[in-house]
Amino acid sequence: MNAGVNVGDIIFQLFALGVPIFFIVILFLFWRSSKKKKEQLNRIEEKLDSLQKGN
């Protein structure tokens, strides 16, 4: 019996752990970007409303 660790097993374990982590990170970055864009649009909308009220 081989008591050592195979390189293929290590690569598979890293891949198996890395794929879900990768998707979680991508979803988090997408959510954060979406939130920042929404906040920016709200600020722009407030500025436009204040300009329209000034006229």
Image (cartoon, rainbow, N blue to C red):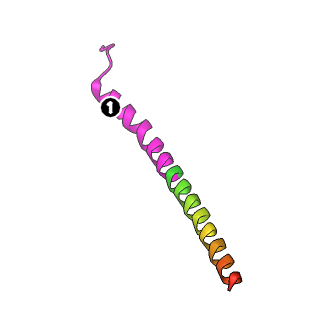
Q: In which quarter of the image is the C terminus?
A: bottom right
**Residue at horizontal 58 percent and vertical 64 percent from the top:** 40
**Residue at horizontal 38 percent and vertical 33 percent from the top:** 14
Asked where in the image residue 15 lies, by quadrant, the reply is: top left
For the magenta stretch, what is the residue range? Answer: 1-27
Asked where in the image residue 1 lies, by quadrant, the reply is: top left
- For residue 13, above or below residue 32: above
**Residue at horizontal 62 percent and vertical 77 percent from the top:** 48
Crowding at label 1, few (<14), some or many (≥20) Cα neighbours within 10 Å? Answer: few
- For residue 2, above or below residue 34: above
Q: Is the magenta stretch mostly helix, strand or loop?
A: helix
- The residue closer to the viewer here, 9 or 15, is 15
Q: Position of residue 25 (x, y in %)?
A: 49, 46
The residue that label 1 is drawn on is 11
- The residue closer to the viewer here, 29 or 38, is 38
Residue 14 belongs to magenta span: yes
Task: Say what amino acid the circle numbered 1 marks.
Answer: Ile
Q: Where is residue 8 in the image (x, y as percent from the top left)?
A: 29, 29
